[in-house]
Image: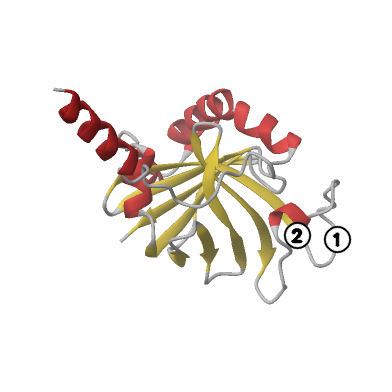
């Protein structure tokens, strides 16, 4: 019996750790982005109500499909996210109830790095845990400009600066092998809620 207990303990000690996508981002997230993420639920409730009431039928269909499905565990998400994705930005609030952009191309690497490869508005950043939630932290920039890493951005954001580099923060949810979303409340520019839909 004692030998069996020792064997089980040895197996547990040698077990591989749970899958992870990227390092913890707890040390780099900005205080204002912590505050933005904390407002996700109330902002989403208000903007989704307006989007469903005022958006076009086609745009509402994209929104509803993109928000359907429960989020998988972080371990499952870590195994699914790396690879090439079609990514589509939805912007809610800030003057227009719902704007749905055409699909672009994004790539997520095994270390959690994310890049939006096409379109005039680009994203460059990382996905990793903040607390117990899988989170995207990155830099929004215009195509052709060289982005600073998220953690190197100045403490104060000037939307009128050139080049225009803005911090981005969003909750990452994977709902299946071919579907995920990033919910970004209170972005610096234009809207009240950005949703990046990922599909393949």
Q: Can residue 53 be seen here? A: yes
Write down the residue under mark 1: 161
Q: Residue at x 52, y 41 (%)?
A: 129
Query: Is 192 placed above or below 168 here?
Result: above
- Give whichever of 92, 143 is nearer the camera: 143
Locate the N terminus by quadrant: top left
Check disc 2: other Cα within 10 Å, few if <14, some if 14-19, many if 20+. Answer: many
What percent of the width, then of the height, locates residue 6?
A: 24, 31
| Left or right of residue 104, residue 140 in this image | right
| Left or right of residue 33, residue 100 in this image | left
What percent of the width, then of the height, locates residue 169?
A: 62, 44
| Left or right of residue 3, residue 141 in this image | right
Query: Is 140 placed above or below 55 here?
Result: below
Locate the C terminus by quadrant: bottom left
Q: Quadrant of residue 198?
A: bottom left
Query: Is 144 placed above or below 180 here?
Result: below
User: Are discs 2 and 1 less than 8 Å apart at CB?
Assistant: yes
- Give whichever of 74, 46 is nearer the camera: 74
Q: Can residue 61 be seen here? A: no
Q: Residue at x 45, y 66 (%)?
A: 107
Q: State how far apart marks 2 and 1 are (Cα).
A: 8 Å
Secondary structure found at label 1 = loop
Q: How is the image coloured?
A: secondary structure
Looking at the rendered structure, which numbered label has been put on residue 165? 2
């Amino acid at each position: 019996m004692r030998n069996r207990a020792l064997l089980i303990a040895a197996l547990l000690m040698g077990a591989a750790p749970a899958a992870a996508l990227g390092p913890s981002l707890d040390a780099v997230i900005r205080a204002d982005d912590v505050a933005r993420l904390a407002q996700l639920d109330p902002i989403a409730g208000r903007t989704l109500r307006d989007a469903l009431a005022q958006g076009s039928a086609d745009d509402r269909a994209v929104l509803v499909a993109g928000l359907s499905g429960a989020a998988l565990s972080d371990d499952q998400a870590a195994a699914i996210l790396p690879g090439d994705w079609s990514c589509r930005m939805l912007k809610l609030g800030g003057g227009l109830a719902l704007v749905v952009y055409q699909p672009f191309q994004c790539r997520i690497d095994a270390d959690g790095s994310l890049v939006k490869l096409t379109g005039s508005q680009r994203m460059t950043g990382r996905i990793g845990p903040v607390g117990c939630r899988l989170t995207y932290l990155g830099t929004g920039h215009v195509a052709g400009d060289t982005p600073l890493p998220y953690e190197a951005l100045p403490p104060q954001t000037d939307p009128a600066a050139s080049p225009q580099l803005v911090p981005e923060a969003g909750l990452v949810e994977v709902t299946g092998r071919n579907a995920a979303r990033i919910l970004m409340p209170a972005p610096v520019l234009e809207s009240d809620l950005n949703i990046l839909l990922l599909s393949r």
